[in-house]
Structures are given as structure tokens and as C-alpha cells.
Amino acid sequence: MITNNDKLRVLIINDMVIFPNNEVRIEYDKNLDKQMNETFDCDDELILIVNPIDDGEKIDIMSLPNVGVLGRIKLKLNVPNGKTRVVIEGLERVEINNYIFDNKNYSANYNIIENIEVEDENNYINILIKAIERYIDRVPYIGNAIMGQINNVRSLDELCDLVASFLAIDYDRKKKYVTIVDPAERCKLLIEDINIDLQFAELEQKIEAQVEKELNETQKEYFLREKIKAMQKELGEANSKDDEVVRLKKKVSKLKCNSKVKEKINRELARYEAINSNSPELGIIREHLDCMINLPWNSYTKDNQDLVRVKEILDDSHYALDEVKTRILEYLAVKQNTNNSRSPIICLVGPPGVGKTSL
């Protein structure tokens, strides 16, 4: 039976947590890790294990906690790679009374913390085991090995320490589990962390499934396009439309139009590229593309203000249609006198010689 001791060496660990009822292995280089070397350079079987409150490089008494773990050194062995391997078994939570520093090592007096009786302990145990089973079932990186150990545990205190050692939580959170003496409080905190981790795992699986679906659709589309190209090649139709698409893309890239227009043209071009060569819509889309590409985007001409010259051009290019030509000349004359920048469309209604013209 372990009893209170006057003074023991203190092992200060910055990157891992040793829980009671758990066993860990530590390897260190005797020439590089002087703190470890000084700590284990003794014949004591028992040792006090603490994690600093702050993770700063400098360690002093003020940064050391008042709760730690009493451990037993089960094995100390020099391995062939020049390092020393130590196996430590966590035994009990202890209260640190005071720390003593002798310019090389820390030591401390301690008292063993008595176990706290938990009302409805079996209910807590059952709830925590169900949470762990759900956690193992949904989180892929947690193995079933823990279940074999859980089935042999009979106290909530031991179960909480075992689960906390397996749970994929960060270092600061694990340090908190060491300092919480009440097993019921530790159990509640564990269930909270398990539920949070489950939410992250479900979100991660959802994102992975969505990415996989999009990737599969992209691969499927690529495969089908390659298959269509192979069939077109066999039919002697290979590269006819593909080459045309390449030429159209070059023309679109040289267009001096705004981004919205270019985006619309690119959408039509993608539609043209994807459509089957035998589709009746192919020609319509092609004509639409030609129309949009050949429009004089951002190209302007100077208006002809000579109405006499305008009438001569209209008479030379169109026979009769006197009412139409008169309406056009009236529109131009009004526009010159009002300096209106608006450009309404002139609507010519009815067959030639019969209908009327109007705006």
C-alpha cells in the first residue's frame, strides 16, 4: 500500500500527460536532455510527475501545479541507439505540499488524495461507456483496443483516467483532467469532449463525402468526353469541333468587351463544347457565338450629321420606301436639335408601302 512520503524527486513533463492507472514509455538522450538525466539518476522507485501550468521555456516553482501523479519507475534501460528508455506506471493523484530546488533537480513533499465516493457511480460508468462505444464506432482513428481494458474497470475514477489517456484531445485539456479530483466532474467533461469531437468527425466525413462525389463526377465527365472523342475518331469526325472550339476560345480571349459579356460568351462556348455534334441546337449555338464574337465591342464611329448625304445614301441603297426614309431623317433631325444621347429603336410596322413607321 502506498503512503504519504516526506520527499520525492519531481519529473517535469512539457509534452505529455501521465494518468493514474496508466503506463507510459519515455526515451531520452543522456547527453542532450540534462533535466531527464538528472531526474532519473537516482535509485528511487517512486517519483512525482507534474505538468507545468504555463508552457514557457523557463520553469520555476510558481509555474508548477499543486496536483500531480505519483508514479513508479518499472524499468530503466539503456538501448543500443544511445538513448535511455524508462517505463513509468501512474499510481495515484497526489497533492504537492511544497517544491524544493537544489540547483539541479526539483523534489517535493506530497499527500495522496483520497478517492471521492460518487453517488450513482454505476450510472456514470454506463453513460461514459456508451459514449465511448459511439465514439469508437464513428471516429476512424480510435481503435477497439480500449474496449478490452474498459471491460475490466470497476471504478469511475479509473475509467475516467483510462478514457482520458485514449481520447484525442490536446495537451492543455489533458492537463486539466489530472487536476480534477472529483470523478463525476471528470466524467461530465469527458462526455462533453467526446460529443464535440464527434461533431467535428461527422463534419469532416460530410466534407470528405462531398469532395469524393465531386471528384467522381469530374472523373466520370472526363472519361465520357474521352470516350466520345474515341468514337468520333472512329467515325472520322475527330477534332473537327475540338479545333473549332480552340479557335473560338482564342477569339474570345482577344475580345475587348466587359467581364459580364465575356462571361456570357464563355458560358455559351462551354455549352457548344459539351453538346453532341449531331444535336440540332449545335448550329443555333454556333451562330449565336459568331454574332456575339463579331459584334464591334467598345468600337465607336462618328455620327454623320449631314442629312442631305444621309438621304442620298438611303436613296442609293433602298428603292422607294419613302415613308420609311422620311421617318429616319426626321428622327436624325430631332436628335441633332435636342442633343439627346438616348438611342431609341425605330420600329417599322407593316409591309413596304402599306404600313406606317413609328418609334
Image: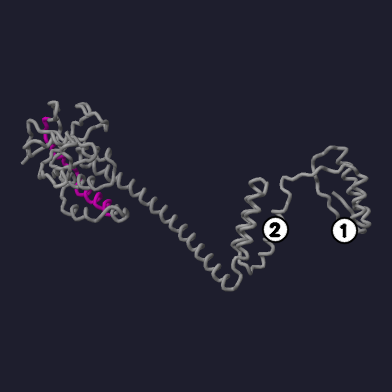
Image position, residue 230 (x, y; %): 54, 69
Magenta-drawn stretch contains 284: no
> Which residue is outermost to the bottom?
235
Tag count: 2
Q: Quadrant of residue 274?
A: bottom right
Depth check: give the residue in front, 167 or 59.
Answer: 59
Label disc, if present, on residue 288 of the rendered structure: 2
Image position, residue 299 (x, y; %): 74, 45
The residue range painted magenta reads 108-133
Depth check: give the residue in front, 202 or 36.
Answer: 36
Three-letter amino acid code of the residue under disc 2: His
Three-letter amino acid code of the residue under disc 1: Gly
Q: Earlier in the sequence, mark 2 or mark 1?
A: 2
21 shown above or below 95: below
Q: Report which residue position mark 1 lands on.
A: 350
Depth check: give the residue in front, 290 or 220.
Answer: 290
292 shown above or below 105: below
Name the residue: 56% across, 73% down. Answer: 234
Left or right of 312, for residue 21: left
Left or right of 330, for residue 123: left
Name the residue: 30% across, 47% down. Answer: 194
Left or right of 284, for residue 49: left
Name the residue: 80% across, 40% down. Answer: 341
Say which quadrant the N terminus sits in.
top left
Q: Residues within 10 Å of mark 2 (few under 14, many from 20)?
A: some
Question: Residues under labels 2 and 1: Cα distance?
Answer: 27 Å
Name the residue: 42% across, 52% down. Answer: 207
Magenta-drawn stretch contains 125: yes
